[in-house]
Amino acid sequence: MLQYSLLPDDLSRPAAGEKPVILTGDRPTGPLHLGHWIGSLRNRVALQHTHRQFVLIADTQALTDNGDDPGKISRNVLEITIDQLAAGLDPTLTTFCLQSALPALAELTLLYMNLVTVARLERNPTIKDEIQARGFGRDIPAGFLCYPVAQAADITGFRATVVPVGEDQIPMIEQTVEVVRRINRLAGAIVLPEPKALVPTVGRLPGLDGRAKMSKSQGNALALGASPDEIRAAVRRMYTDPDHLRVEDPGKIEGNVVFAWLAAFDEDRDGLRELEARYRHGGLGDATVKRRLEDILQAVLAPIRERRARFAADPGEVAAILARVSETAREITQATLDDVRAAFGLYRLPTVARTIGRP
Ligand code: TRP
């Protein structure tokens, strides 16, 4: 079941017989959790059958706000790849690419920087929010301010037309479209396609403690590789309705994490609606609802955990998967770079024969 809606209108139609190109990416800053599963991973598993899908491990983008702790990024490259493989992404259908292994993306970024002003970057709503949240002033890393430009390089580098992202990333796609139009105008031809954002229709999965955002650093996340005991413990401590003290009391669904998670995971929609009605009315205890959620989570996570263990036992094979596909990705992104260099009319040096042994 696909949980995405397309913005702003329909899928860009690819040439006959070709699958539309999708690019998504994650910053390798930590292990993936169930919020990622609901928000993106399970959709990627479906999309790999209908699209030519690239998944970028965005390590150079992750450096833009982790320059003081780069080791954290490199440590998480294989981890995040293993998480994706565990989720069911098939390396024969999905192309995983390591951003830092694709120098054409860095060069595209450098060229695009000439088309984007600092004022425009500071107006980007996501950048604006992040600047505020982190208290950046003039001390903002230049790479961080410019990461929307780098993301435009990622998207155009693969000539992606569909970019599945969370709502907070829509401004990045808008800036990419602006860059694409500038390049096409410079080239006097359509050399790059305009991408569209594909945004999940389901809401964000709240953290175990009831906060809107699940994150490992807040300690309110459930990891994709969680053990059966960890799943049980997480459900047990999950925030419900603090006023629902006795079983016979009426309970609230709104803000109740157990029901929010059931809404995301429970496929028996009629059964769930009935359960909600009984909970609201009174006479249904938290323990019963939690048992239902725990059973569902155990069933969803068991195959993911098994696959995870298998890949984690063979990190060399995971690294080899990344290395193999990087070759293909290098060619694709280099071809875009050639077009963009031509659009800028960069001076082309002639090819000259090398004189061996002479300077
Ligand atoms: N900025 C994205 C995030 O933080 C990650 C990302 C990097 C990305 N490059 C991308 C997403 C290209 C989509 C397309 O989640």
Image (cartoon, grey):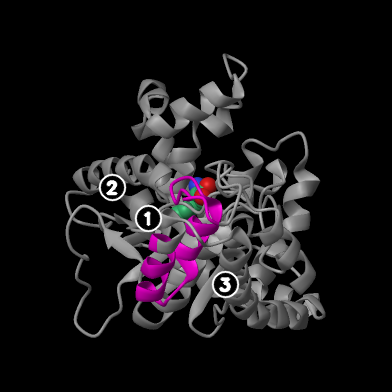
Query: Few, some or many C-alpha atoms within 10 Å of disc 2 (few <14, some 14-19, many ≥20)?
Result: many
Residue located farthest toward the top when viewing the structure as drawn: 138
Q: Nearer the viewer, residue 312 or 276?
A: 276
**At 27% from the left edge and 40% from the top edge, which residue is drawn?**
178
Instruction: Tell me the residue at 53%/49% (across/down).
Output: 206
Residue at image mark 2:
180
Marks 2 and 3 sit apart, C-alpha to C-alpha, by 48 Å
Eyeballing the image, is 265 above or below 217?
below
Q: Is residue 278 above or below residue 344?
A: below
- Pointer 2 with pointer 3, Cβ within 8 A: no
Q: Amino acid at mark 3?
A: Arg
Q: Is residue 298 above or below residue 185?
A: below
Per the image, the residue denoted by label 1 is 156
Q: Identify the residue shown where x is 38% and y is 58%.
A: 202
Q: Is residue 304 visible?
A: yes
Q: Classify residue 319 by image quadrant.
A: bottom right
Q: x, y percentage for residue 110?
A: 48, 40
Q: Position of residue 331 (x, y in %)?
A: 49, 69
Q: Main secondary structure of the magenta part?
A: helix
Magenta run includes residue 221 = no
Residue annotated with mark 3: 292
Please state the horizontal and vertical placement of residue 191, each as a whole percent of the image.
25, 57
Quadrant position of residue 20: bottom left
Sort mark 1 into few (<14), some (14-19) or many (20+) by Cα contacts within 10 Å.
many
- Highlighted magenta segment, given as a residue range: 248-277
Q: Give yes or no for contact between labels 1 and 2 (Cβ–Cβ under 8 Å).
A: yes
Residue type indicated by callout 2:
Val
